[in-house]
Image (cartoon, rainbow, N blue to C red):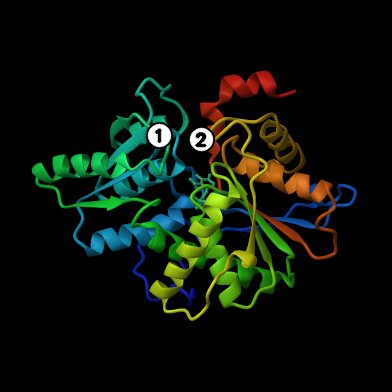
Amino acid sequence: MTRSDQLTARLARVALGHFPTALEAAPRLSAEPGFPPVWVKREDQSGLALGGNKPRQLEFLMAAALAEGAQAVITTAAAQSNFCRATAAAGARLGVRVGLLLRGTGQEAVQGNLLLDRVFGAEIRFIPTQDPYDPRVTGWLDDFVADFRRRGLQTHVLHLPGHTGTLGAAAMVCTGEEMARQFAAQGIAPQAVFLAAGSGLTVAGLVLAFKALGLPTRVVGVSVQKPAAFIVPLIVERANAAADLLGLATRVSAADFDIDDRHIGAGYGVPSAESVAAIQVAGRSEGLVLDPVYSGKAFAGLLAQLREGRWRGPAPVVFFHSGGAPGLFANAALLTEALH
Ligand SMILES: Cc1ncc(COP(=O)(O)O)c(C=O)c1O
């Protein structure tokens, strides 16, 4: 953990991952005709339990939970959630019991993240919805919490689409600040950073950090779940709530970032032909491991915009690799058929 992070200095933090994560040039991608120099922020290599963008966020979320005396945390997301897998691992590391309320039937193959949730000893329950914003989720969370509390466990809820969103976005400001330091150290001024947008909290944190630091780099979130009309106002709200939490005067508006919602495909969690193709390009040009749910769709969005000629050199474009590797294995059968 580095405490050279000024913007998030007032937040409590526990060490869980390996930071800073690398910022690497991707020379073979950069050599594609018409492409600007491409760099990759290796947040997939953040250390805890196969990495990704969640370990850094959890350093802040778990610190806040521990400060309130939590002996258990409960969170909710999709059955193949990277956040849940990272929370389960963080709980194991910190001696905190973890309950996961997963969207699904319970008949899902025990593979990828779900397999790792089991390895890390999380208690798992399934809920009959596929919508993270389903209003019934709060009630199901309350029931789960009541069960933990009956067992005498001081229990804290991490609900990213709900009350935890502000701290979740503020935590990601730390990632943006780290990138700004790395850009300066490399002597580069990237024109854009591309990343997957699920809840949009990572986009919110990066946009806030770059704006607070006066960086001209455009943040382009490639939505993997919701249309831009839904997610843009949420990102603005989260970024500004995070600014308040961090004591920053900076304010973010919808004009400060892009959301590209053309790459969701058939829906959240459903691999698209385009994301499979993107997985191959990243794997075969740079040895990167992308997944078909998040980073594959984000990379598909990046490739599409680069091929459209939207970002021409000499200033680099950065792919923020947010991890998600377990999702690749959870979709092995489908991918085996599609890969060529
Ligand atoms: C691998 C991966 N990439 C990107 C994201 C998107 O992050 P956010 O929810 O902050 O938009 C997630 C979120 O679950 C993820 O697991």
Label 2 environment density (alpha carbons within 10 Å; few <14, some 14–19, many ≥20): many
Q: Looking at the image, which residue sits at the far right? A: 33
Q: CA distance from mark 2 to mark 1?
A: 9 Å
User: Mark on residue 326?
Assistant: 2
Q: Say above or below: 105 vs 264.
A: above
Q: Quadrant of the N terminus?
A: bottom left
What residue is pinned by disc 1?
A: 116
User: Mark on residue 175?
Assistant: none
Q: Quadrant of the C terminus?
A: top right
**Residue depicted at 57% across the width and 30% down the height:** 270
Q: Say above or below: 323 vs 127.
A: below
Q: Position of residue 121 (x, y in %)?
A: 29, 36
**Residue depicted at 31% across the width and 37% down the height:** 101
**Residue depicted at 38% across the width and 28% down the height:** 104
Report whether 249 appears left or right of 309: left
Q: Amino acid at mark 2?
A: Pro
Numbered label tally:
2
Label 1 within 8 A of ligand 1 by Cβ: no
Q: Which secondary structure lies at badge 2? A: helix
Q: Say above or below: 249 vs 36.
A: below
Q: Say above or below: 51 vs 114.
A: below
Report whether 121 appears left or right of 130: left
Q: Which secondary structure lies at badge 1? A: helix
Report whether 112 appears left or right of 271: left
**Residue depicted at 52% across the width and 47% down the height:** 198
